[in-house]
Image (cartoon, rainbow, N blue to C red):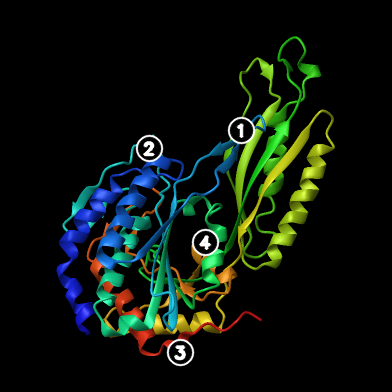
Amino acid sequence: MTRPVSALSTREKSLIESLIRLSEINSGTLNEAGVNQVGALLSDMFCKRLSCDHQQRTLPPYTLFRSDGRAVENPLGDLHILSKRPDAPLQVLLTGHLDTVFPTESEFQQCQWLDDQTLKGPGVSDMKGGLLVMLEALSAFEQSPLAQRIGWTVILNPDEEIGSPGSAPILAQQAEHHDVGMIYEPALPNGQLAGERKGSGNFTAIIAGVAAHAGREHHLGRNAICAMAEYITAIDQLNGQRDGVTINVGIVNGGVTTNQVPDQAHCRFNIRTRIRADEQWCQQQLQTIGQQINSKEGISLALHGSFGRTPKMLDQAHLALFQLVTECSGQLGVPLSWEPTGGCCDGNNLSAAGLPNVDTLGVLGGNIHSHREFIRLPSLVERARLSTLILLRLAEQPETWRRQPMQ
């Protein structure tokens, strides 16, 4: 084991202290202040330890629709870009997100020790632990004489948990100027790497009906909730009709009181796709169902949203990179393999831009996106060692890993 890799063994205590501090700052995606607090702390840590350049970018607000169809703009936290040696022979893009799925009103705000090697807390695995792994790996790599062969850029984005709507253009632009991508999402529950990933689209359906008194003039009303129920049933029945496509209705609301025929209803749903052609099929089905709902007297449906992430497929460049990662893991005595997953992340975005990447280089843990989220603490150092070794191997033969132009 090389000296920079072995030196990481002394860092666990400091890493745990930093992890607890970061995780107990609420950074739910729409908590702009909390996301910015985490971003400021981390960017300061990166700059002090790595002597890198730092840019801070303001993103456009994120639009959500109310049940009455009104668009509400929600400010997002800032995105941070940290970089070093932009003229080096090989350019590596490392990304991680500052936000979590836990809003300010969540009851899950504090860390709790489950045993001496396991910590429960918001974002400990997804992905504040991964952000610290990234920092440790870069810090160790910078101690090597091989460091001069690699230039790197770190993107810390504030909106990954809602599909990276604001940061997607920046991710795509940066991907064009790099050769390899490394992303610090947590490992799969079995500790392995994610390979192929499904694509994802997020949609909002808004139905308007006609309000009326529920007792005196019920017949004059047009019930938006009932129409929405028909719409939801129809799109749910698309599940199972096309291999790998799943549709999940996650949020539904409407109406104001029980003695009024409701004239508004609203639902939000997610679609996962296996191949790019699935998107067109889904759009056609949604159009047909929407036409059926709109044909009802006094009812109108408006659909908002799009497919924000295309499926991540493993081409030869991805497979070569995955093979390097598995070789490094074997050298460290923890051999890894990769497997497909229905989840998606910024690895989809980088892949769509032609950048080969491994996107589960973060920590080992489980129960992410729940109040039971935990991290296996030894994985902080274990995964930092893995990333350090990957960077060293890339630096040994930078010309081998230079990205080929997209055809």
Disc 1 residue crowd, few under 14, some 14–19, many 20+, Cα 10 Å: some
Mark 1 and mark 4 in contact (Cβ < 8 Å)?
A: no
How far apart in space, not on screen, are marks 3 and 4 (Cα)? 30 Å
* Residue bearing the label numbered 3: 399
Query: Mark 2 vs mark 3: which is more N-terminal?
Result: 2
Query: Mark 1 vs mark 3: which is more N-terminal?
Result: 1
Question: What's the amino acid at mark 4?
Answer: Cys
Residue 344's disc is 4
Judging depth in this view, the residue of 7 and 305 nearest the camera is 7
Residue 66's disc is 1
How far apart in space, not on screen, are marks 4 and 1 (Cα)? 26 Å
* Secondary structure state at the residue bearing disc 1: loop
Question: What's the amino acid at mark 3?
Answer: Glu
Query: Mark 2 vs mark 4: which is more N-terminal?
Result: 2
* Residue bearing the label numbered 2: 106
**Residue 371 shows in the view:** no
Question: What's the amino acid at mark 2?
Answer: Ser
